Amino acid sequence: MLRKFIPHSPALFLILLISPVTDTFSQSTKKAGEGEKLEMSIDTGNDVLPFDKIAYQKAYTMDEREGRGIVTSFLINKGVQGIQSLINNRRKKYAADYSFAIRNESFYDQVSTEGPFDPTGIRFKGFTIARIQKDANNRGDTVFVARFSIDTSGGKITDILNNGIFKLKLDSFAIKSSRVRLPRHPKTLNLDFEISFLSSYISSTGQIFQDVPVGKFIYSIRNAPMNPEDPGYKSFYSNLTKKHAECSGQSFLVPRSSGFFKNEETKKIESCWGQGIYSVRVSVKECSKNSFIDKLILFSSNDLLSLGSSSLQKKFGGSSSGSTKSTTTKKVSNN
């Protein structure tokens, strides 16, 4: 259980974010990392995709397409999702990383007879990660907490139904103690969240798949103030999710495993598709010096798909020399 800091309602959490100078969320003077525990929990619900929010659509036949053919013209419009960062760990005192993981959760609340990607009954709503720091009396104090959820705004529900793809967004974030040494002035921190979804399932032909990656997301926070006395501290955390909520990346729906169920109506054992077994891994990287961050361009709305990497480097600039160019995930802590 997440203790002492995690509220029971979104309204209370918002109050905590808007009022960071209170004793509940004052800057910690303890050395970060000592006696800490990493915790992660999955948020579920019974009505993640309510029927009244699903837009009506028409599936055109070839005769109804008025000569447009099978493939229509389209625009490449991913938008500029900004500069994502990979932290260079050459200076451990200014950079640190830690991981969370939850395994063998069910993505859907019921089995299906429609197919392996039937979106009916999605129960996954999101997840919460936290760092719990214990004092000399073994009492827990939450010094870091972040909550992510599945994005159902705008046309995201249609994308889930039509393409079997979902997005994530940051709902709330707060931190009062870092694991790295902070500069004297200004006391700011950079964070990267790398979120991976993996699935284990059996296909209809009997093939077994274990921990297959189905999606990855990145969320970056830059120059987060760590001193409650700074003028911009309060507004930064209260406006973070308003200005920058959506994560970069995407994930396919978790595939349902081929199996069987006992049909109450027919009183027989019949074939079905299961509840979708999945795992979530979250890697958090902290860095307190911008000079130790390696920059990586992910997307650009003005570039064609065939644009080479050399052209991208010429336009946007390459990563710093000696940088770490891979995002190899370290050993995950199961808490």
Image (cartoon, rainbow, N blue to C red):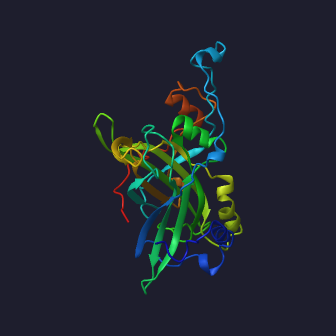
| Rendered-image quadrant of the C terminus | bottom left
Q: Is residue 14 left or right of residue 111?
A: right
Would you place residue 326 above or below residue 46 in this image?
above
Q: Nearer the viewer, residue 202 or 16?
A: 202
Which residue in the rendered view is the most extreme toward the top? 67
Can you give x and y, in whole percent of width and height, for residue 223 in the image? 60, 59
Would you place residue 52 above or below residue 33 in this image?
above
Q: Nearer the viewer, residue 55 or 40?
A: 55
Q: Quadrant of residue 186?
A: bottom right
Q: How many marks?
A: 0
Residue shown at the point (65%, 58%) measured from the top left? 240
Can you give x and y, in whole percent of width and height, for residue 89 in the image? 42, 55
Residue 211 visible = no
Residue 3 visible = yes
Residue shown at the point (47%, 45%) measured from the top left? 216
Which residue in the rendered view is the most extreme toward the bottom? 137
Can you give x and y, in whole percent of width and height, for residue 222 in the image? 59, 56
Can you give x and y, in whole percent of width and height, for residue 295 in the image? 52, 45
Residue shown at the point (54%, 62%) measured from the top left? 146
